[in-house]
Amino acid sequence: MTEQMKKYYEKRGQVLVKNLKSRHFDAFYCPDAASALKKALELIPEGASVGWGGALSAQQIGLIDAVKAGKYAAIDRDSAKTPEERNQLLKRCLTADVFLSGANALSLDGEMVNIDGTGNRVAAIVYGPETVLVIAGMNKVCDTLDDAVTRARTVAAPMNKQRFPFKTPCEVTGSCADCKSEDCICNQILITRNCRPAGRIKFILVGEELGF
């Protein structure tokens, strides 16, 4: 990454931190993955139950591996042996002490957009876990909320869909078709504009490109 890009991300990051705090979120800017991992672990108490959903950015900075290896009660949905067990683990995440998430997009004035297929991630963001910790690369930040919704639908969702084997138009073409497919992964669109109670949702903004 060029020095110009680093400065650009840092300046936008500081604006976004201020705007997130004005909406009662906690927010921190970290210039790279290593500092983001350090800050995240500072925010997770030892012994806490920790679940996650749609958290590729958390995985990329090493946070998922650190939770699994650390003194935490990890709720790892990928450890399930059956669909039924996986579903139970997803439900346990809804009452976790800490829930790790990514963001499909953020507006510069401090609103977050997430799109889900099943809904477990957006459900946990809205209510349940004591703390929601969002890891977001600065590539997710858009100038306006409309831009953020567009990014979530036309960039993040089609890219995310490439992970799954079932067919939708965007899996074939790479472009959103606003489909009603049985296998659609865009079934819930959540805009989180304020945090209540204050500080429950915490953002770590990372000055790198992470996630989709």
Image (cartoon, rainbow, N blue to C red):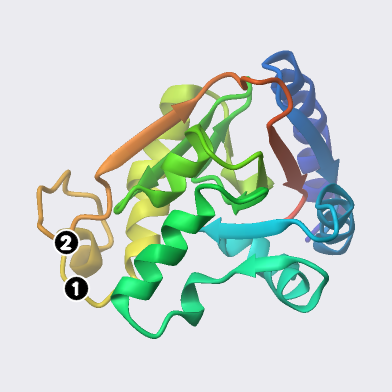
Mark 1 and mark 2 lie on one chain; the one further toward the N terminus is: 1
Residue 58 image point, x, y percent? 66, 61
Residue 74 image point, x, y percent? 65, 68
Q: Is residue 44 visible?
A: yes
Residue under the point 27% across and 47% down: 186
Q: Which amino acid does label 2 sit on?
A: Asp
Q: Quadrant of residue 87?
A: bottom left
Residue under the point 42% across and 52% down: 156
Q: Say which residue label 1 marks.
A: 166
Residue under the point 55% across and 45% down: 103
Circle 2 sits in a helix, a strand or a loop, which is it? loop
Residue 156 as seen in the image, left or right of residue 13: left
Q: Quadrant of residue 61?
A: bottom right
Q: Quadrant of residue 26?
A: top right
Residue 8 as seen in the image, left or right of residue 89: right
Q: Say which residue label 2 marks.
A: 183
Q: Nearer the viewer, residue 138 or 85?
A: 85
Circle 1 sits in a helix, a strand or a loop, which is it? loop
Quadrant into which the N terminus falls: bottom right
Circle 1/circle 2 CB separation < 8 Å: yes
